[in-house]
Amino acid sequence: MSKKEFFPPEKHLAIDIKQLIAQSREQVAVAVNSTITMLYWQIGKRINEEILLRGRADYGKQIVQTLSTQLVSEYGKGWGEKHLRHCLRIAETIQDKEILYAVSRELSWTHLRSIIYIDEPLKRTFYIEMCKLERWSTRVLQERINSMLYERTAISKKPELTIQNDLELLKNEQRISPDLVFKDPYFLDFLGLKDTYSEKDLEESILVELQKFIIELGSDFAFMARQKRISIDYDDYYLDLLFYHRRLKCLVAIELKLGKFEAAYKGQMELYLRWLEKHEVVDGENPPIGLILCATKNQEHVELLQLENSNIKVAEYLTKLPSLKLLEQKLHQAIEIARNKTTANE
């Protein structure tokens, strides 16, 4: 008979009571946050209605200033002009009260204040749903927005209807597609690599900074192996990094390349994926996905090899970040080119 730790009845009672208190506190916090968010929305809606009623552009500025003075006098500096403009913005951005109420049960007012100033509706929805799914803190959310996560994620280069469908699946069924997971480029500036380095240096730096690398990959990635030996016939091959993605329910094989993407990398990755599917995949898992990280992507090679329609992803990595303006320009250009090609092929 195995020994079990014995707890007196009083100890069990204390544990149960503590759990009830914790649950109650969490429920109260959710209710308070939701009530505050809905209050701000109602205030913004009411101010907007008054501005529309008067039909004068200059009246909007005047009413916000006047109202702010009155509210600060009675309720404190938290009701300043800037805060009222946040209230106006959320009422303009999320006009459906029921939708906002559902979101406010999961995201705080501070989360929403960062998201409502994103102009593109699909981009806003992306950050809302990913924030809910991965439970980002407000700091992490702001970091994701600043790093242009949406523009780097594969989904941003798809047609609008595809983006809408994938976000709806994520919202309603918590089903995530690979296009919402994989990025291009990946930011590896935290590795601190010098101007010249080898593939071994790159791999070892990633392992040293594994936690930061996983944060850049996405929170659902779990590290499994480095230099995974793959024996085929009488030859041994070594896969650089092997991860598992919890929500995609599949292995992710990662190969690191110093230079530009070459056509031969496709065959190498296909071999690794077929081996993993035969020897490593267990019941209930999806087929493995390959990610080839290169210093330069070589877009035409990727297109001719039709990799964008396969389970092999190719992406660039940046060990030093360009200026935000240049990065923004490159990402928006890549999105526009990808969408134009999709339209041309329809």
Image (cartoon, rainbow, N blue to C red):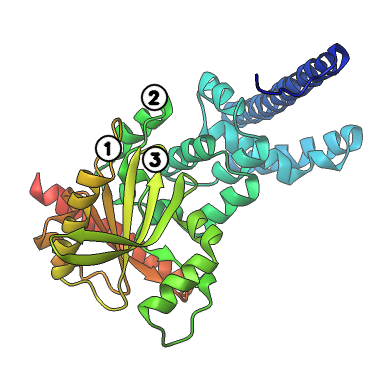
What residue type is disc 1 on? Asn
The residue at the far bottom in this view is 196
Residue with the mark numbered 1: 286
Between disc 3 and disc 1, the foreground one is 1
Q: Name the one closer to the observer, 341 or 309.
A: 309
Residue drawn at the location 55% of the way across and 21% of the way down? 97
How far across and how far down the image is residue 221, in percent?
A: 44, 48
Q: How far apart in space, not on screen, are marks 3 and 2 (Cα)?
A: 18 Å
| Label located before the other in sequence (3 or 2) | 3
Q: Which secondary structure lies at badge 3?
A: helix
Badge 1 density bin: few <14, some 14–19, many ≥20, Cα 10 Å: few
How far across and how far down the image is residue 271, in percent?
A: 16, 57
Q: Which secondary structure lies at badge 2?
A: helix
Q: Name the one closer to the observer, 45 or 184.
A: 184
In the drawing, does residue 149 fall left or right of residue 333? right
Badge 3 density bin: few <14, some 14–19, many ≥20, Cα 10 Å: some
Which numbered disc covers residue 122?
3
Q: Is residue 296 visible?
A: yes
How far across and how far down the image is residue 247, in percent?
A: 40, 37
Q: How far apart in space, not on screen, are marks 1 and 2 (Cα)?
A: 18 Å
Q: Is residue 269 visible?
A: no
Which numbered disc covers residue 89?
none
Q: Name the one closer to the observer, 222 or 296.
A: 222
